[in-house]
Image: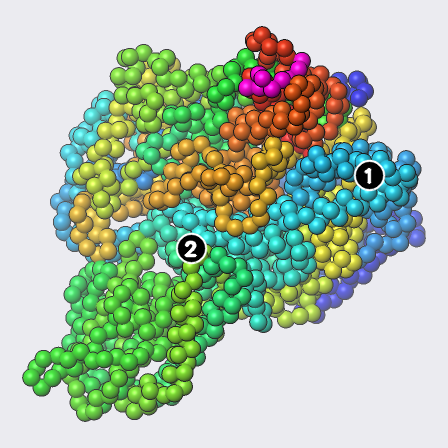
Amino acid sequence: MNRVQRTGLVVYANICLTLVLTCNDLHGQEKINFNSQVRPIFAANCISCHGGVKQAGDVSFVYAEKVLPPEGWIVTPGNAEESELISRVSSDDDELRMPPPGESETALTKAEIDILTKWIEQGAVWGEHWSVAPLFPPSDIEASSVASKQHPEFDSMIDRLVQRELQSHGLSQSSPASNEQWLRRVSFDLIGLPPSNLERQSFLASCGQSSNKAGLEECYAAEVDRLLASPHFGERWAAVWLDLARYADTQGFEKDPHRDMWPFRDWVIQAFNQDMAYDQFTIKQLAGDLLSDPTSSDLIATGYHRNTQTNTEGGTDDEEYRLSAVIDRVNTTWTTWQATTFGCVQCHPHPYDPYEQRDYYRCLALFNNTEDCDLQSDFPTITLSDDTSSWDELYRLYEQRTQLLKQRNELGSQLARELTWQSPEVLEASSNSGELVVNDTDILAASGTFPVGVEYQLDLNCFDLAALKIDILPSLPEPLAVAEQGALLTQLVVQIKNEDGSWKTQDLGDVFADYIAGPFRPTDALEDNAAGFGGYPKLYETRWCVFVPRVAFAGKQRVRLTLKQKGEVAGSLATYVRHLRISTSSSPRWQELLVSPELKSLDEKLADADSFVRKQKGAQYPIMQQRTNQGERHTHLFVRGNWLQPEQETVQGSLPNYFAQRSQQPVQNRLQFAQWLVSQDNPLAARVWANRVWATLFGRGIVETTEDFGSSGTPPSNLPLLDYLAWQHREQYSWKLKPMLREIVLSGTYRQTNAGDATSYRLDPQNIWLSRGSRTRLSAEMIRDNALRISGLLNPKIGGPSVMPPQPDGIWQTVYNGSDWVTAEGQDRYRRAVYTYWKRTSPYPSFLTFDTPTRDVCSARRIPTNTPLQALVTLNDPVFTECASRLAEHALTNAGAERVHLRDCIRFMLESAAIVGNEDEMLDVLSGLYERVMQTSSLPSSEVDLENQKLQHSALTIVASAILNLDVALTK
Amino acid sequence: MNIKHEIQLRTFQAETRRHFLTGCSLGLAGTWCALQNRTAHAEQLAELPHHAPRAKRVIYLHMAGSPSQLELFDYKPELQRLTGKDCPQAFLEGKRFAFIQGVPQMLGTIFPFEQVGDSGAWVSDRLPHFKTVADKVCFVKSMHTTQFNHGPAQLLLHTGNQNLGAASFGSWLMYGLGSESENLPGFVVLISGGKVPSAGKSVWGSGYLPSVFQGVQCRSQGDPVLFLSNPADVTSVERRKMLDAIERINQMTYQATGDPEILTRIAQYEMAFRMQTSASEAFDLSQESGATHASYGTEPGKESFANNCLLARRLAERGVRFIQLFHWGWDAHGASASEALNAGFKDRCREVDRPMTALLMDLEQRGLLQDTLIVWSGEFGRTSMRENRGGKEMKFVGRDHNPSAFTIWLAGGGVQSGSTYGATDELGYESVENPVSPHDLHATLLHILGIDHKRLTYFYQGLHQRLSNVTKPSRVVTEILS
């Protein structure tokens, strides 16, 4: 611990140094930078054998302490000659040389050995990986760098930081884009839609009126403010977040049934529209249920992690898929917030980054105690009625109901713990299928088949029977290594033998359980149905409950118990009790409890809450709900990641060691974990989000691998810029997105024209250094929304259940699933893409073609492609041909006059589409197209008149379709 | 835009394309890598093939739901004797079934078997046509998997990983070898039986590979490729004029911006246009002779396995790299007539027997079998016990899922015909002799296609991912190679 802390301090010092010093130190000798010069040598040549997984010779280049003294033995700081590292990499002896000839064809180059030597001579200071290093505002040196010579008016901090990189690569900033080009870009980037004709004209007019630069800046700023205030802003940014949240309208896997998940999508839209700060946005989604006094909105936010898949295929193991969902939550959290490939650590230590396998399970333990358990019902859910204004009250009552249920149960379970229990004599135990055996007080399912609905009959001798306790035990000794198949008592019938030999069924007044967990109430065991008491769908440990008859029986009684077990899990697998014990209590306090005012009062309140909750009709929305402490599941490390091989030892929830050592606050539960993510102790989250925002606007992140900020990801192209944005977002804008976007889209960097000159393309083909404006294809969502918007078909309605716009017949062929794609009627056909029903096993075809992920798992980056199938969508998909037809219709009717010029019609369409380019040239080509299509008819083609509209409309539709398919229409 | 610069760009474009299109027979994959500047990936791809391929393309016939090996190929007289007896406890301990619970009864095959051909392979009477071509195939009777549910087992078999998110076999081939066809998708998926497989479209998804490599589901009913047809009121002459106009304006945009992605878009629009003609032609079964229709048992215009087999041959002729057929409805648990060995299973056999036999013979006659690799499989096997769902005797006869043993067959280029590899125990319950895992199968199939399975990788989530699964053992089953 001491050593690690000290390393931390050294690291901190080193970072301060690298920020202040340039490449050369005072003595003129090159100062080696660990991260940019030394670490890459280790990564490329050493860590396959000396990494996190394989640590040959107890040397690992992932951990400072495995290299540097006192534990490490291969480097002597300050003395390269005495360092084993240098002698081994520079050895001529094949037996000694590292990397060994068998592993690597070539030895390290002289330059590489020089770097390592100098690094050791200079003290062998280990540097923290750039992504986890503390965040600082830009240094004075960076801040004072000069703006572009050609465009000195753009000297925002972003521009200056970009300019530094441009200069060092022999590049320069491009001219600003035209007002139209910037407007198109910023409109898609901020709200995902092109500007309308009116918006465009009004913006251009106000730009034209501004007589000076300051005036123009005001116009630009006003336009940005208009877009940021638009309710469509949230829809655009939600689309970005929903890939990470793996949001979908179905449960996934084989049957892929429907799930009422849309309230989560709407929550995200509203959160962006309200500009919810990223720290709150994070905490609510990961732990909204654990906040003190949460609102319904906080609870809906927790749907983020209820977007995991539920496997309802017959015979699947609910514990396997519950764990699979929890594992997905851990991986998704680390990908979304930390861009860390944490999934690696599930099976073994991280090969490149300093996370050990146990770290994975520390984190898993934080997520392992929610009530959801892979049931088709998606339990736990809350009913959200159509009237959103009732949601807060609804949630209050839902919560109250949960509390009342616990309180009333506590009255009985407390009493049960206070009293002593006797074991009655078991005279006979039989089953209507399968064999039971009695072993002293234990009754066990011994052999044969125990089908769904199996009934046990137990005959007992009891004395002074006031309450009956049933222990449901696992069939294996405890503690269980792996949860067992569920064991559920769905109804208990108690009979007492009369003197005449007949049996009289007793009235059972109540049932109290050891604790409340799972989808059923203890009292369900009084009814003849498939609900009841026990471990369901899995049994983690012994459970017990107490049945209390309304009247106690004094003296010796012959008692017959019938245990009905109608429970089953997916695949009609019976959840029968395999091991049980009966005990009795003679205390009169049980019957007193049944009539106590305290219980009565709780039950009255519970009945009220129940009746309100049950009356609700609407979405069955899955939520996060923490299990009670008594029912806590224990987390174990899985050997090689195999859930069937847990270690004995229990793992407590906490941060991975590496972060725990750098954190001031304790992290022992989900809420604290969420708070830590967005705390000052974790600079990674700020960097990851800033990078994602940048990537969303520019098409490429400052770190290209938006999903991987570890050693295996690509290094940032401009770390000071990334750090500036992260710092600015967190510190200056208090985690608010809108002001950050405002700053970026008004910067000179963003405003550059996307026409690249020769130097720009030669030196920077990927536009990594940002020597020109970004030019990217519209996203799948934008492709649809754009066509709807410019044809005037777009229904701007925000929120609500997902809709099914037209898609070709026969796309949905999911097995054992009765759902149909019922094509929406009326205005619902024209909703924005973000509202399209998302079926995981069969997503909307045209979206898939334009690179959306399936949303089975978290997806941090869409890699854009350019394929012929995309062309077929925008050329032939009836959705797009309808848009083209409508656009042509508008062009005709908009003209208003009896006879209008063809060019005016086409100009109208180009302007509606917010197309930027040489309008005259385009008009020539498109008028030519119209004329060539019309050649087959005898009508004049240079003018359009209302008499022959039908023919002209169909020709104009072809022109409109061509416009929708232009590269300039598909890109921003 | 400066002309010199444009020429430079064009040369770059042309060179990369030519390099990948001719040098490595890469289609979109190489172009994609070049344009995305994925040099590391491009360099790796340039090494392909790693050795001389024995087959150029794959036709994968997947019987979704998993047919019973015990009713088709894996004949077990000992099991026959035990029919109706309680399953020995040793078989049940530590086993987890999808539906069987308690103590089920053993079930011998319900159909007669005979040995056929020179190879003497055992085939049941459900496949009378297939018996005539049994000498052309190689049976692997010792397949085993770790998954006993359909979805995960299908994912494991087609992506090398039971969890979602990995890339499918076909998408790996698209990534590694690209397409031979300029005008058709290189990875085509055809569905019959009215349902997609349990694991959904992910079994032909691209997972972590770019989406351009995913399989394209084509249909024998309606548009073979989604959105292939022009809108009803647009003629192909009009479409041509329209594309010309689009290209002219796109060229202008390219002149103005210099963005090479525009040139790709122009090329893709042209390919889409060609695909409209060539895909329609490829999927037009009316071009086939009456004799061919009779041999396959095809009925044009319907969705059927027979139609898909004939389409598979037509696509193979046209250079499609990976043709994957899924025929649904093999999950014969005995829960209903359609899913019972003594009812629906017989129909399924009838539906596939004639066409898959015709496909083998047809490919051979056309000289295509020697460089086409055919694989026939389910996703796991069936139990040697009769299923007792809910712990009760069921109305129909069926078997539960058995991950421990199943039979597949391979045929065509690189495969030893007329042979059998591996064996199950006396009751057909476990693979005991030369067991083959899905990872071994992947390594072997890639080997036949000229690919070293350890060298075709894609860097994702910190790992050089590969089809044969980095974390699992795998080997090329050289014993089945010719």
Q: Is residue A332 left or right of residue B135?
A: right
- Please report, as a chain letter, where disc 1 is located: A
**Which percent across, then down, holds residue A589?**
33, 90
Residue at 46%, 26% in the rendered image: B225
Residue at 44%, 38% in the rendered image: A823
Q: In this view, does A691 lie to the left or right of B289?
A: right
- Please report, as a chain letter, where disc 2 is located: A
Q: Nearer the observer, disc 2 or disc 1?
A: 1
Residue bearing mark 1: A206
**Which percent across, then down, holds residue A627?**
46, 69
- Mark 2 lies on a secondary structure that is helix
Residue B124 figure quarter:
top left
Residue A593 figure quarter:
bottom left
Instruction: Please give the range of residues in magenta.
Output: A942-950
Given the image, on which type of amino acid does mark 1 rest? Ser
Residue A883 figure quarter:
top right
**Which percent across, then down, holds residue A504?**
15, 80
